[in-house]
Amino acid sequence: MMSYSIALNFEDGVTRFIECGEDEKVLDAAYRQRINLPMDCSDGVCGTCKCQAESGDYELIEEYIDEALTEDEAEEGLVLTCQMIPKSDCVISIPVASTMCKTGTNTFKATVKELRRYDDAAFELFIDANESTPGFLPGQYVNIVVPGSKDHRSYSFSSAPGENMAFLIKQVPNGLMSTWLDTSAEAGIEVDLIGPLGTFYLRPVTRPLLFLAGGTGLAPFLSMLEVLVKQECTQPITLLYAVTRDQDLVLVEALEAYAERLPNFSFMTIVADENSTHPRKGYATHHLEPNMLNDGDVDVYLCGPPPMVDAVNDYMKSNNMTPANFYYERFIPSV
């Protein structure tokens, strides 16, 4: 029997995936897999199970009352999970914490496949997926437990869902993860991962996209671009990739390959170091052009350090630029 993959995004950033049969209600599928979504009646009367469908095709059984879900709410993508039958893979936002549904983050094991070093700038870590590897949404992250410790560090997937996992990791001097990667990591070592996590992920594409990456904040966009290739996306996609030093520009060849696979994709690289010989120096905001905002009809995604997020926010406000949607992920490299 056919089944669909349903991503349940909880308000605490936890994402859990369930399998839903072709004629099965989401609420029933969740309870079958021991995720107790909010509900009181399961008959379309109370409205307790009301959630937001972010993407996917589905039908709502006509067995609910207007007090539980109005016609306007249904048109806006609100659903009752007790009446929702998916017709494709779906993403649903659940307006409670995962712990309220007697679930939480996945913890799973995987094996290091390969490690690449990029001078003193970054590492690229490849990890084999296995049958216990959960799904994730392009743009999300996991916590990787540093072997030999109880501490973990958070890293965005740079690979697409359904493939072996890859992560682009900033090299932090004397950092716990950086030290392990530099001195001990090798193929065959088992690591513990926790996740997936995060509300920064690619939404359904209905308009042009503007991606802004700061340093290793490039990682989630590599995941998104791979998915956009598979979706044969026809919307214009622009990426600004800003770094501090020349040597921080890594995986540019991957972006060049995406430019060949996605004819509507273009990118530019920017280096902040004033002594750089790079043709574009400064910060991302120095190279943002009004046409990139498409008169506001654009979805903006930003992953970078807090100063970059603040600078882009200030730039758009001062220039009266309001995108249709602005999604961002702040990251601070941990020692």
Image: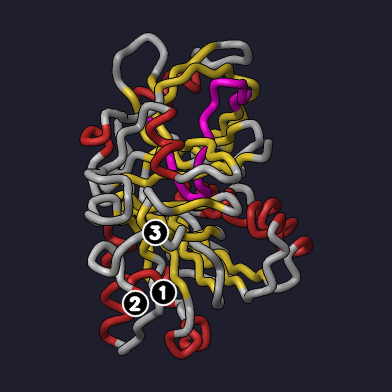
Please tell me whether residue 64 is drawn above or below residue 74 in the rendered image.
Answer: above
Q: Alpha carbon of mark 2 to alpha carbon of mark 3: how far?
A: 16 Å
Quarter the N terminus occupies: top right
Return the disc, 2 or 3, that comes first in the chain's sequence.
3
Query: Magenta includes 133?
Result: yes
Label 2 is placed on what type of residue? Asp
Q: Which region of the structure is painted magenta?
A: 127-143
Label 1 is placed on what type of residue? Glu
Say which element carries label 1.
Answer: helix
Magenta: main secondary structure:
loop
Query: Magenta includes 206?
Result: no
Q: Nearer the viewer, mark 3 or mark 1?
A: 3
Q: Which residue is identified by label 3?
A: 63
In depth, the one of 195 and 303 nearer the eye is 195
Please tell me whether residue 174 is drawn above or below residue 307 in the rendered image.
Answer: above
The reply to whether dot 1 and dot 2 touch (C-beta < 8 Å) is: yes
Q: Is residue 55 left or right of residue 306?
A: right
Badge 1 crowding class, 10 Å Cα cut-off, few under 14, some 14 to 19, many 20 or more, is few
Q: Position of residue 80 (x, y in %)?
A: 35, 55
Q: Which residue is identified by label 1?
A: 75
The reply to whether dot 2 and dot 3 touch (C-beta < 8 Å) is: no
Task: Write down the quadrant of residue 110 in the picture.
Answer: top right
Residue 72 circle label: 2
In depth, the one of 190 and 79 nearer the eye is 79
Say which element carries label 3.
Answer: loop
Q: Position of residue 61 (x, y in %)?
A: 46, 58
In the image, what residue occupies the spot 36% across and 75% down? 71
In the image, what residue occupies the spot 26% across and 43% down? 38
Q: Position of residue 181 (x, y in %)?
A: 49, 22
Return the disc, 3 or 1, that comes first in the chain's sequence.
3
Q: Is residue 243 left or right of residue 149?
A: right
